[in-house]
Image (cartoon, rainbow, N blue to C red):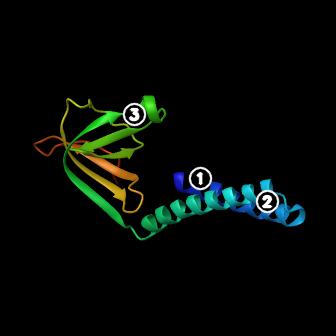
Amino acid sequence: MEVVFYWLIGLLCLGSLVIYWMDWRKTRNRVKLGQAVLAGIASIVLVGMAGMETYDRMTTNYIVETGECYVVDDRSSKGPSNVTLWFGERSYDFKEIPDVTYGPGYVFTCRATMTKQMQSGIDYELRTRDGELLYSTKLED
């Protein structure tokens, strides 16, 4: 869903770039030129981010991280439904909160999948040290 919002906002910025550019050509006002430049920069950044994320998902260009990890709840800083998986010093953000006891005191054997360019979380699973599956974001068929 994030990718759709990136594309939508990026295309809106591109549309505002066209409108500000046409206004600047009529009035030659520096403010309109500044607005056109800002809209251009914003559209390049947002469409670039959306393009990288879309490319990664279309080509299944993923990073897979495995090993011991722990889960931290990021509700206070990033909204109501985010967790971070920490693999030592590396961290990755995911949307789904596990329904098992977690936190820095609980170490799991983890497998996490992220997009390669943006490193946004796709799915993850938590296992005990014995290999028993505790939680997975993948849909079980």
> 6 or 122: which is nearer to us?
6
Q: Nearer the viewer, mark 2 or mark 3?
A: 2
Q: Upstream in the sequence, badge 2 or badge 3?
A: 2
Residue located beneath label 2 in the image:
20
Which residue is located at x 69 percent, y 60 percent? 37
Q: Residues within 10 Å of mark 2 (few under 14, many from 20)?
A: many
> 92 or 137: which is nearer to us?
92
Which residue is located at x 73 percent, y 55 percent? 35
Residue located beneath label 3 in the image:
74
Q: Secondary structure at mark 2?
A: helix
Check disc 1 and give the amino acid type.
Phe
* Residue lying farthest to the left in this orientation: 130
Q: Upstream in the sequence, badge 3 or badge 1?
A: 1
Q: Position of residue 45 (x, y in %)?
A: 56, 59
Q: Is residue 1 visible?
A: no
Disc 3 and disc 1: Cα gap in Å?
21 Å
**Do the residues under discs 2 and 3 have CB atoms within 8 angstroms?**
no
Q: Upstream in the sequence, badge 1 or badge 2?
A: 1
- Residue 5 is tagged as 1
> 70 or 43: which is nearer to us?
43
